[in-house]
Image: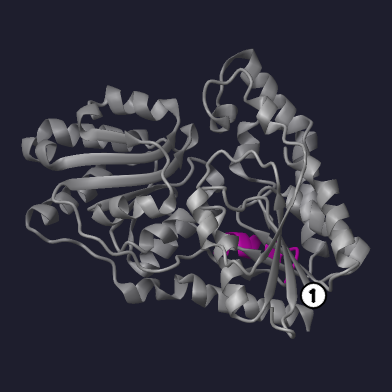
Amino acid sequence: METNAKTVLIVTYYWPPAGGSGVQRWLYFANELKQLGWNPVIVTQQNAAYSLRDKSLEDKIDKSIEVHRVRGWEPFKMAQIGSTNTQQDALTQKGFWGAFKRWVRAECFFPDARMFWIAPVVRFVQQYATHHKIDALITTGPPHSSHIIGYRLTKKLSIPWLADFRDPWADFFQNKQLSMSKRMQKKHLYWQNIILKNTDLVTVTSPSLNQKFKLTNTTCKLLTNGYESLLKGKQSESFSIVYTGVMKAIQNPTNLWKVLGELIQENSKFATDFSLHLIGDFDASVSHNIQSEGLQAHTEFYEYMPKDNLEPYVTSAQMLLMVSVNDEDSYQIIPGKLFEYMAACRPILAIGNPDGDMSSLMNKTKTGQVFDYSEKIHLKEYITAAYDSFQRGEHQMISNASIAPYKRSELAKQLSGFLTEMIS
């Protein structure tokens, strides 16, 4: 470790072997901060109930980074009782047991089910601080229990604190699915504002969330997600659409399946050339709609894969499928996976809010187009035009220059500047 390196302690629930896009933001930021002369120290959970695991990400961690794992009770492990699927179905599981679990999660766990991690981490960091100088503290949520940790620590230790919001808090779509009482909704909003008012710096991943949070804390800054490096690979000879990650019921693009089913019925050549590759963890409604629209013969489902194994599928695609959430507040969400897709330099077909931040970013970078969940006509025209280009042998590619500002090494320089300003 460099003798003059400032220590930044990062509290993050998601850390390898966690999988998915959420873990990658601070995994790679920590690596980049190390290269920029900081001393990142990670505090994460020892016995975390990750729904997705990717042990290959452990090899991506800079070996010189200090990692501390703190044990806390994980109620999600109990929540899996009575469920035949992963914890991803907890928000849509039917019957009394499903409704009961949603009620408990909404009304008994605040700010989330990781609340039992708060006190052990606060104790650990207090003890750590007696032997080590901490120059800055970062908490990242969700889970937003991490921010409660930050609030308590700064009251005890007076450390400059950056609160990083990867997603909204009070109006996050999952809270609506839980049918949360008005009392709990007010409590979430109250504590969101407490965090915003007491942190020294706030970072968010979308312009709309930045604008909203600036009303409470003027230090709020935009720090989007990004990609590590450009991916290389040969495009498939079939007209392939590829999706990777989790697709919950609220993300299921039913009109897209209808449009693809119609194109298969109407165009025999399209039916021959078309293939759909769905890689990851999918709600049961997705496979049901795939079958009902006659797509099963053209579709391959794959289990969740480590990030490195995904690259050949992503780079071979003629088109990458991105879905946000079918919710009125989705305009303020830019999924982290969008940037991983950008790195493949393939056109992106997105389903979400066409007036939201994801659409604005895709228009700015010319990486694809966003269609509303209710759209059919223009969606069909877009896919037909892409297929016509494919038939003419025109392989569409995204310009590297348009996405260069979103490389993580560039974003980390911004973060380093934010931290320097905060502690000076």
Left or right: residue 266 compared with residue 47: left
Q: In this view of the protein, can residue 206 be seen by the observer? A: no
On the image, the x and y values in percent for residue 15 come to 61, 53
Quarter residue 95 falls in = top right
In the rendered image, which quarter contains the N terminus?
bottom right
Mark 1 burial class by Cα count in 10 Å: few <14, some 14-19, many 20+ = some
Left or right: residue 402 compared with residue 46: left
Which residue sits at x=13%, y=30%? 265
Q: Nearer the viewer, residue 15 or 344?
A: 15
On the image, the x and y values in percent for residue 80 come to 62, 25
Q: Magenta segment range?
A: 205-218
SS class of the residue under badge 1? loop
- Taking the magenta stretch, the answer to whether it contains residue 211 is yes
Q: Is residue 51 above or below residue 96?
A: below
- Taking the magenta stretch, the answer to whether it contains residue 376 is no
Which residue position is annotated with label 1?
135
Q: In this view of the protein, can residue 132 be seen by the observer? A: yes
Quarter residue 234 falls in = bottom left
Q: Which amino acid does label 1 sit on?
A: Asp
Quarter residue 32 falls in = bottom right
Q: Is residue 302 above or below residue 23?
A: above
In the rendered image, which quarter contains the C terminus?
bottom right
On the image, the x and y values in percent for residue 294 come to 22, 26
